[in-house]
Amino acid sequence: MKDRLLLFDIDLTLTKSDGSGIRAMERHFCDYTGHIGEVRLPRADGRCDTWIVEQLFVVNGFAYEADMYEGFMQGYLDELSRIFRPPAAGVMPGAAELLPELQKRKGFYLGLVTGNDYRGARIKLEAFDLYHYFPVGGFGSDSGVRAELTPLAMERAGRHYDRKFTLGQTVIIGDSENDVRAANIAGAHCIAVAGGFASRSELSAAGECTVIDNLCDAEEFIRIVESFED
């Protein structure tokens, strides 16, 4: 059995919320820009924070430059750390039980591929004691293009775990159509979890993937991972 690199998305794959993440960004946007009234929000599922922040400014009629990102994110992350906690946020079904099973399995290595800024990823996962499972990843602060995060995560995982991971050994686990498309573009395997906004049929139509309802069946999840050809 060859090694497997399992790269997880976060939002609606590992964690869930009542919208507190995007609400934190909306609140800070008003403080940052002085915007009054309704805030138009870009659809965020499967997108990267660098893209989301830019689009937030653009669709609400504000000029945006890339060097504004860091200043904006500081306030957003402060707001996120304040509100991303129970009962507003929680863990997706099966995630807390699956991760330790994967961590202790020989030849399985864990990481992240998420549209979250690396600091936002830590805030969301540490809220539920899940961050320690993921020493490496590709993040929305690295690039606004989701498909570019997989090779970044693979490179970092290779250094951290002292292994050479191929795309045939790499599995992306996400919940959105963009997660599936990005995995296909990168050339990695994909497990799509139908716990987010996309239905099973929408995930299947987005590209090549194995669709599951949730992360509750650890044995079945492991069987799927081991069935992928290198």
Image (cartoon, grey):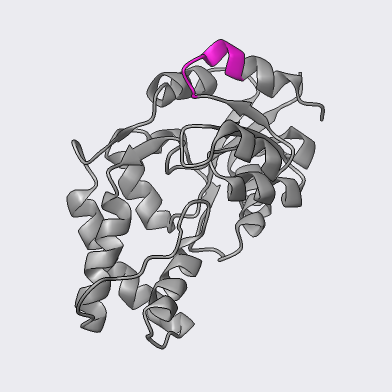
Residue 169 in view here = yes
Task: Let me know if residue 217 is in the magenta part.
Answer: yes
Which residue is rendered at x = 74% and y = 52% of the image? Answer: 185
Vertical arrangement, residue 59 with respect to residue 201, above or below: below
Q: Quadrant of the C terminus?
A: top right
User: Which sits in the foreground, 46 or 187?
Assistant: 46
Residue 22, how many percent across, how many down? 32, 57
The residue most toward the top is 219
Which residue is rendered at x = 44% and y = 83% of the image? Answer: 67
The residue most toward the bottom is 63
Q: Quadrant of the N terminus?
A: top right
Task: Let me know if residue 9 is in the magenta part.
Answer: no
Residue 35, how many percent across, how many down? 23, 81
Q: Quadrant of residue 149?
A: bottom right
Which residue is rendered at x = 21% and y = 75% of the image? Answer: 37
Magenta segment range? 214-221
The residue most toward the right is 230
Q: In which quarter of the image is residue 193?
A: top right
Q: In which quarter of the image is residue 80?
A: bottom left
Residue 188, how many percent across, how many down? 73, 41
| 102 lies left or right of 180 | left
User: Which sits in the foreground, 108 or 218?
Assistant: 218
User: Which sits in the foreground, 28 or 39?
Assistant: 39
Vertical arrangement, residue 201 with respect to residue 28, above or below: above
Vertical arrangement, residue 125 with respect to residue 222, above or below: below
| 223 lies left or right of 69 | right
Residue 77 in view here = no
| 97 lies left or right of 101 | left
